[in-house]
Amino acid sequence: MRPENHVVSKWFGNIAARTAGWVGSAWAFFLALASVVLWGFLGPYYHYSDTWQLVINTATTVITFLIVFLIQNTQNRDARALHLKLDEVIRALRGAHNEMIDIEKLSDAELHELAKRYERLRRAYELKHNNKKPA
């Protein structure tokens, strides 16, 4: 990554994290609610005109469009960090299967096959476990 890209990426990540945190707060919800209520109360004053309707439609569309990218960036970073932590736990545990490291990069078909494998292991464990119980 070029140094200027790193600076932009770090700046964007910082803005995205702070924005996602704020957007998820009670204050943001109440500000949005108050904006919608104010807009609704102004309806009679503006005779429910097309412009009055366009204001809320445009504002919510633009805000939603921009926030989606910020929240997606934050979710991508959180998911990447979580996968790295899980990979480290798998690597550190003696009995863990190291092939599970980086499985998020597998195709959907490969993940489906892996899920079926673990489902078979779970069923075999249940059968073995249930057979040991006294009747």
Image: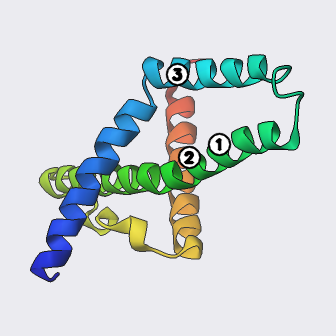
Which numbered circle lies on residue 63?
Answer: 2
Q: Residue at x 30, y 44 (%)?
A: 17
Do residues under tags 2 and 1 come within 8 Å of each other at their CB atoms? yes
What's under tag 3, amino acid-wise? Answer: Leu
Which numbered circle lies on residue 6?
Answer: none
Q: Residue at x 14, y 83 (%)?
A: 2
Return the residue at label 1. Answer: 60
Give 121 or 80, whichever is nearer the viewer. 80
What's under tag 1, amino acid-wise? Answer: Thr
What's under tag 2, amino acid-wise? Answer: Ile
Give 18 or 114, whichever is nearer the viewer. 18
Residue 60's place in the image compared with 81, above or below, is above
In this rendering, position of residue 8 left or right of residue 64? left
Circle 2 crowding by C-alpha within 10 Å: few under 14, some 14–19, many from 20: few
Question: Residue 68, how many percent across, how many down?
Answer: 52, 52
In this rendering, position of residue 7 left or right of residue 40? left
| Residue sticking out furthest to the bottom | 2
Give 86 or 35, whichever is nearer the viewer. 35
Q: CA distance from mark 1 to mark 3?
A: 13 Å
Secondary structure beneath dot 1 equals helix
Return the residue at label 3. Answer: 31
